Amino acid sequence: MYEQTLYKVVQPVKLTTVNRLNKSKKWKYGYNKEHDIVVISKTGMIGDIVEIQNLQIALPKQPKKIHKFEEDKWQVTPYPKELNRIKSIFDWRDYPDEFKNKYIDYIEDEFKRRESGFWFYNKGIATYITGTHYMYLQWSKIDVGHPDFREANRLFFIFWEACKADTRAYGMCYLKNRRSGFSFMASGEIVNLATISSDARFGILSKSGADAKKMFTDKVVPISVNYPFFFKPIQDGMDRPKTELAYRVPASRLTRKKLTTATSDQPEELTGLDTTIDWKNTGDNSYDGEKLKLLAHDESGKWERPDNILNNWRVTKTTLRLGSRIIGKCMMGSTCNALDKGGDNFKKLYYNSDVTKRNKNGQTASGLYSFFIPMEWNYEGFMDEYGLPVFDTPDNEVNGPHNDIIDTGVIDHWQNEAEGLKNDQDALNEFYRQFPRTEEHAFRDEANNSIFNLVKIYEQIDYNEETNQGISIGNFQWVNGIKDTNVMFYPDPKGRFRISWVPPTNLQNKFIERNGIKYPGNEHMGSFGCDSYDISGTVDGVGSNGALHGLTKFSMEDAPPSQFFLEYVARPQTAEIFFEDVLMSLVFYGMPMLAENNKPRLLYYLRRRGYRGYSMNRPDKVWNKLSVTEKEIGGIPNSSEDIKQAHAAAIETYIQENVGLKSNGGCGNMYFNRTLNDWAKFDITKRTRFDATISSGLAIMACNRHLYTPNSKTHKAKVNINFARYNNDGFTSQIIK
């Protein structure tokens, strides 16, 4: 059975604190630094605190009175027919007070729901939707009429409200599946905010200018046109414009008489919002120099060269701030193209938006907050009448929102689709990108550029995601902080190491000492490979990562054979931290390491600390053929074409034998998806970009060093030197003929 993992109720604040501040209505809308939560309640009181994509969000407190629709689910409230005849505020003013009084409470309630959100019972459960979501469901016209209520969209709007409330955020970067409704939701939010904002500008960008224009004319404008009169500001220009929607007083209205005071001879001083919505052609400098209240950024993962979403965002970001103060937000969302068709830039932007990774100002690298909803939550045709996903195939038929019958679970349906594409890897990857169940699916690349077996790699990735193999995250430390003693592993969610196996206690920290030099005691069990770096900082502040991988051999010890058990891909603050991390790993596992010696600081570090015995010599040369430096520190160069080819061949062989589905129905035991994805993208002509591939390949070569040992057999032939022989009897030596 499928278990949801999209959100969870958490309790980061003591209940006594919540109740105390609720009593005095002291909870302010926005980011609460003291408790590290984002409050989206506008009542001064909070209820449940939910965690969505690692962001803790405090919802409004559940009220005593909750709306209940007749069918115990969301329903659009019919617009009173009498009000439907009123097209503008000017028409409203012509009606008598008796008529107005009849509907004034109704109109005020709509404004309250728009501002604070709405509570209703859904399948018997008290459910909260934000004001933006309410406006989308109740008042937004889309291609199918009114939108359906979907639980996935409810969580989307809650997360978006948190992005708006959080003064540290520039908005959201939403990784989605096709037909999730993002374009309509973004269009609805543009109109919702624009119709209550003064002296503001709202913008639209998409993968092309034509797409941005289409979103404006086919989505934004119809939503604005169909707003009820009490939400519709004074508008200038055509009802259905092509380039700009302007909420300002037209010249023809400037001298209009007040309709509320028929006896007055003074011209009415009309005030408009002076707010506009428009779209721009796609380009790096779109909206450069402008000031935006909201930017709807659609199909951001489909920008193809020469357009670059990363460059555009660097420019666009400045339109949303004044100095350090964020004055506007970006609602960005997209599926992802193949990585070499613009997807790679969107992928970087998405991962730079991780809320768990912030700078000292509390902001993510991009300024945005990443958000992903798996396809099973929002796949058309598999939502029941309550807007809840039908994950598993039901025992009995389930009614959909339009009285359609659902007899298959969305997960089974998705797996059947994927199974039918197994023999066409590119088509399968495209399906994954369009309908991803994981972030990994969303960023699947095309198969034609890989030198390795992508089918096996992706089989392994899928298996790892489905089975959720136990990977421990943490760091190594010297016991009691005393170096060169024993090492322990300490779990830490923010740790740099990922491990899938640790040796039994009796095999930990095992070494052999010969002639005063320490050697690893578990060399027969496995080896490490390492791709190091020498310089702590770089000119661009980025630089490559240091990488370390541990791999077991087949042995009689209690260890899984041919399994990668450790993955380390990180760039700590200083190179010395990385060197110490590597050293502690070698000591803990008692295994040697094969490292590239073109960046020798790590190897000199080990030698200086007395661990030269842990650095393997290059396996393709005998001792007397090694250079002076190689004898001194060990390691293997990366310059030789033969070594590059041998390195790639080692990975290829390992993948073929140990990765992906097996003929017996099982699967490989390579559980590190980051490395698997690095293999998938590996380009042998640009090796320096692939730290994990270099490191893991060296580990494989180290464990199979016998394959690279030079042939020591020499041909022995008898050589007749023809030394003269002598008879040395007597006083004179005589030659023997």
Image (cartoon, rainbow, N blue to C red):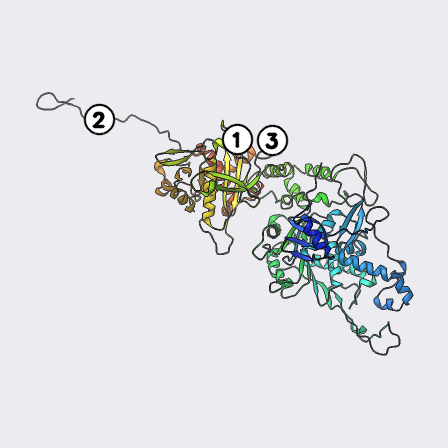
Give residue 526's position: percent from left, percent from top: 48, 33
* Badge 1 or badge 2: first in the primary sequence: 1
Q: Nearer the viewer, mark 3 or mark 2?
A: 3
Secondary structure beneath label 3: loop
* Badge 3 or badge 1: first in the primary sequence: 1
Going by the image, does 548 lie left or right of 603?
A: right
Location of mark 3 (residue):
662
Task: Pick out the residue farthest to the left.
Answer: 731
Distance from disc 1 to disc 2, alpha carbons, whole Å, reads 57 Å
Tell me which residue sits at (87%, 61%) in the image.
103
Determine contact: label 3, label 1, CB under 8 Å.
no
Give residue 436's position: percent from left, percent from top: 67, 44
Does the image show residue 46? yes
Q: Quadrant of residue 361?
A: bottom right
Distance from disc 3 to disc 1, alpha carbons, whole Å, reads 16 Å
Q: Is residue 174 above or below residue 695?
A: below
- Circle 3 packing at 10 Å, graded few (<14), some (14-19), many (20+), is few
Q: Quadrant of residue 39?
A: bottom right
Give residue 659's position: percent from left, percent from top: 57, 35
Going by the image, does 260 lie left or right of 374?
A: right
